[in-house]
Amino acid sequence: MVNTPRLEGLTDWRPLARGGFAVVWEARQESLNRLVAVKIITRKLDNPEERDRFLRESGAAGRMSSHPGIVTVHYAGLLDDDRPYLVMELCTGGSLTRRLEAGNRPSQEWVRDLGVRIADALDAAHAQGVLHRDVKPANVLIDAYGHAGLADFGLAVMTDGMDLEERLEALTPAYAPPEAFAPHTPTASGDVYSLAATLYALLCGHAPRAVDPGEADPDMTAAQVVMAHLDDPVERLPDVDPGLMDVLIEALDDDPAQRPSAAAFRDALQALPLGAPVAALLPQLDEPLASATTAPPEPVPTAASTGSSAPRRWWPLLAAAVALLALVAVVVVAVGGRDRGVAAPAPEPSAVATSATPSPTPTLLTGFTDCSATVGQPAQCGPSTPQCWGGVPSAFDGLIVATPARCDETHVYQTFAAGPLTAPVIRQSQLDADPAAKAICTRRLVNAMLPADERRGDWEIFTIPAQSAEEDEAYFRCVFGRGERDAPLTLRSPG
């Protein structure tokens, strides 16, 4: 368990993620009543020189936050025990790591436009003498409007006191330039390489010199595995536009001197004739909502040899919800537990186009068991293989986009039940008000599935929509949690 931090003006702390040398929390900034992300570095800065350098680098990151391709840094400082922290914009869309999955990769146009945006951010940073040094999918975040931004500027300096192998592990060796595997002075060229490696991974799901985990020596560290393959050529991706591959291959050159500058890389990407620019992860807000019901079932956008994209159906709905709420000037980020103890009736959701069309005859979801008799209506409990989540944010009343997490690693929430929707929904408030969700996603059902010593009355309960193309969109899922866990709770049949 990680102790909750104490910082003046910040309340409602909730852990979101844990990385190699940092923990990310969500907190509420009381003065502005807004949610922020707080990144706390686990390494303590023991001497004045290190502390001054951190504050200098984070100050530069704060000044660069005005760039649209850089995540806003509100302020930085040191905890009482000398651990440094950054208070940043909370990006509810998560990071690009979720776009590496086979069913969720973006189109080539989107990858190109992302590269232009982040390369421009790097060019602005390099012009101020600031290097990022750890560009990778996990450090490119998506805000509530679908815009991408580069995060964690200046944090790589925290690894300078580490030995080479320890530093590489902290900075993700798969995206590090070849020169990083030997003592060297970091350069702007290394940032360009790492960005190109990130774009490459978005197109195929893995870094340029990634090794299948099943083929890697289990006794080797991640850094050692990458080092063993540094001489392997970067493979061209056959289904990717040749011009785009040419630009990426040049930026992935082993020789730093042969790589383009960030500005040249940006310009080369921008000049590619792949198709119309894609402004954000979300579709355009004026896109007809009806398209959500006619789109093919693939998730958002998939890479194909044609370069076309097939948006995942709930993203247009989330975009429409954002537009609708913007029209009435409502700006709310709804994150936090809700009390399911009151069974007062809620307004029925309006009948509009939706990401979920309820099935007339509910089917049993994979891994779930029928517990309808216990609930008193069609309900499924489980799944048999635990499913865990790190966070469940909802922006602008959009449907929750949960953060997947391994159940044997740090997580906060766990799925415990599912059920068929009784009506279409496009907003989280509609999903929460669904009569079936209100009947199934309850603390009473959770506690009925837990051993007596694990039951509690303050579980945080959420109703979430389907989170991947593999899940039936006619069903909602119920998740529960309270604080961090490193192992899943054992759920049994409530009957």
Image (cartoon, rainbow, N blue to C red):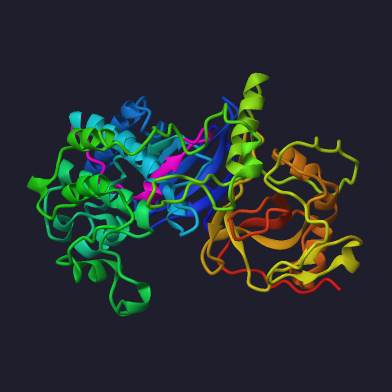
The boundaries of the magenta stretch are 128-146
Instruction: Indicate the position of residue 25 as horizontal and vertical percent values.
Output: 51, 46
Q: Is residue 81 visible?
A: no
Instruction: Indicate the position of residue 275 as horizontal and vertical percent values.
Output: 37, 36
Q: Nearer the viewer, residue 237 or 454?
A: 237
Q: Looking at the image, is 494 positioned above or below residue 242?
A: below
Whether 135 is among the magenta residues is yes
Extreme residue in the front direction? 306
Q: Looking at the image, is 32 positioned above or below residue 319?
A: above
Residue 447's image quarter? bottom right
Q: Is residue 358 left or right of residue 41?
A: right
Residue 110's image quarter? top left
- Identified at 80% across, 51% down, the residue is 437
Q: Looking at the image, is 63 positioned above or below residue 341?
A: above
Q: Is residue 232 left or right of residue 462?
A: left
Instruction: Indicate the position of residue 170 as horizontal and vertical percent values.
Output: 31, 58
Q: How many marks?
A: 0
Instruction: Indicate the position of residue 468 as horizontal and vertical percent values.
Output: 58, 55
Residue 152's image quarter? top left
Q: Nearer the viewer, residue 21 or 395?
A: 395
Q: Is residue 172 visible?
A: yes
Quarter of the picture holding the N terminus: bottom right
Whether 267 is among the magenta residues is no
- Main structural element of the magenta stretch: helix, strand or loop? loop
Q: Nearer the viewer, residue 306 or 441?
A: 306
Quarter of the picture holding the C terminus: bottom right
Q: Nearer the viewer, residue 461 or 48?
A: 461
